[in-house]
Image (cartoon, rainbow, N blue to C red):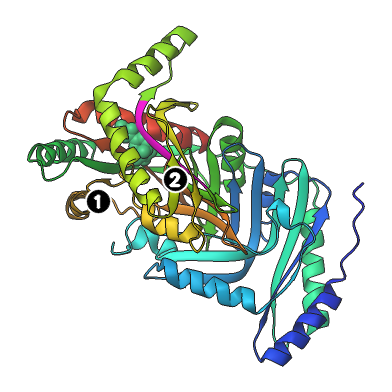
Amino acid sequence: MIETKEIKIDGVLQSAQKQSIDKSAPTFVSVTEQIEWIDPIDFFQAGKGIEENRIYWSSADQKTQFIGIGDALLFHDVDASYQGLKEKWKQTMENSWIVNPFDQYKTGPIAFGGFPFDAEEKVEELWEEFNGSQFRVPTFLLTIDKNKAFLTTTVYVEQGSNIDQLAAELITKKNQLLLVSKPTYQENHIVLKHEVDPAEWKKLVHKATTAIDSEKVDKIVLARELQIEFDDVCDIGQVLGRLQKTQENSFVFAWEKDNVCFIGATPERLVKVDNQQLFSTCLAGTAPRGNTKEEDSYFGQQLLQDQKNRNEHQFVVDMIKEAVCSFAKYVEIPDQPILYPLKNLQHLFTPVQAELDQGYTLLDVVEKLHPTPALCGFPRESSLDFIRKFEQLKRGWYGAPIGWFDQYFDGEFAVAIRSALVAGDKASLFAGCGLVQDSDPEIEYQETNIKFTPMLQALGG
Ligand SMILES: C=C(O[C@@H]1C=C(C(=O)O)C=C[C@H]1O)C(=O)O
Ligand SMILES: [Mg+2]
């Protein structure tokens, strides 16, 4: 049993209401309590039907998991302004009433969200629910930090709110979430797979390498789409469970918006900031895993020595180094990449560490870094130009920053690759490749096939 001092929610809401009367403004209320450990995916599944819009996030080491149910607050910005978001969050925190004795455990007011890959991309049908940048604070947030569990409840209180009713509603929903018996999961069955124009995509790879030969651009990342259909509405909880079990060294995420879900397991950290300590990742260059230990290490060694992959990787290292240098006095980056093993493939990996200068926060770094040459190319302008002109796919949030930040702007963003957009009984999967001078269309096509595999398997393929 956990010894917790029970927090009387109605008392908190009353105090918050007094504040909103004094300030003539609604108060953002956030209350954190420690609870008995609960299975995070069961909690996610239990949230279905209690409130709309769930979120799931797991750090790559799986030590931290966040599960959010409902939206207490939503910042939606079609222009995806980073600085605008910073301002809105500061204002929210100024008019808040926070009860949180567990600050150090990634609890309290935390905003979850993402940005589009390219804010100038015209949003079409597929990404309608995920247009612009969207950040939200869940009504109920379960934080799993190692073996501890916390529940943060968030609600707005206004001058005229009916406190008794609000408190009763929150308590009922909380009990529904926490006292549920083991929820049920549905197996997903894929009945149709459709690769969007692979022949066209290979031609485009050729076009990109031709552009690279002409020396105006050094690297271009091109992505493609795989569409699938299920025999029934896809059970997201089931997919999450599989991703969490199979995709080690990856951030697992699921963002629901009006019954559409953007879900994935990405190995690529964009940036994490914890108390001014900055961590970023250069991840580019890919090889398959071997079937035996010998084969696996052979593929790994080949990858480490392969000039084409090393070139792909180096553009990312150089750019991230330069970008981070503008925020920090020193940056620690090893000279040589190492291997980053995943279930279905391995990457070249260079970690980046720095101490962020005072005055800068996580969102400043995200704004500066995105899009890195890992997802866009190098130089940024000419590669983005090529993508805008010729890539057939609408990227939406694919390849873009997705993550969270807390009250103090500490938090973490990953690059949303190895991902899919699931809408009812349909899904679109996305995978891309970094192209350099000697990229071969067929080999790059095979590389995207392996990159589809983790999501495809988790979805039931
Ligand atoms: C673009 C993707 O991945 C990126 C491209 C890689 C490559 O081409 O080697 C490797 C990791 C990522 O930087 C993707 O998975 O969709
Ligand atoms: Mg590659």
Residue 56 left/right relative to 455: right
Residue 150 left/right relative to 252: right
Highlighted range, magenta: 278-286
Q: Is mark 2 within 8 Å of ligand 1?
A: no
Q: Which residue is mark 1?
A: 380
Q: Position of residue 162 (x, y in %)?
A: 77, 85
Tell me the element at label 2.
Answer: strand
The reply to whether the magenta stretch includes residue 304 is no
As displayed, is residue 308 above or below residue 361?
above
How many residues crowd mark 2 within 10 Å: few (<14), some (14–19), many (20+)? some
Q: Position of residue 420 (x, y in %)?
A: 44, 46
Residue 410 or residue 120, whichever sits in front: 410
Q: Position of residue 335 (x, y in %)?
A: 37, 29
The reply to whether the magenta stretch includes residue 285 is yes
| Residue 136, numbered circle | none
As displayed, is residue 18 above or below residue 173?
below
| Residue 330, numbered circle | 2
As displayed, is residue 74 above or below residue 374?
below
Q: How far is the residue under mark 1 from the one under mark 2? A: 24 Å
As displayed, is residue 108 above or below residue 417?
below
Q: Position of residue 167 (x, y in %)?
A: 81, 75
The image quarter in which residue 170 lies = bottom right
How many residues crowd mark 1 within 10 Å: few (<14), some (14–19), many (20+)? some
The kind of residue on which mark 2 rests is: Tyr
Residue ID at (66%, 60%): 69
Tell me the element at label 1.
Answer: helix
Residue 165 or residue 348, whichever sits in front: 348
Q: Main secondary structure of the magenta part?
A: strand
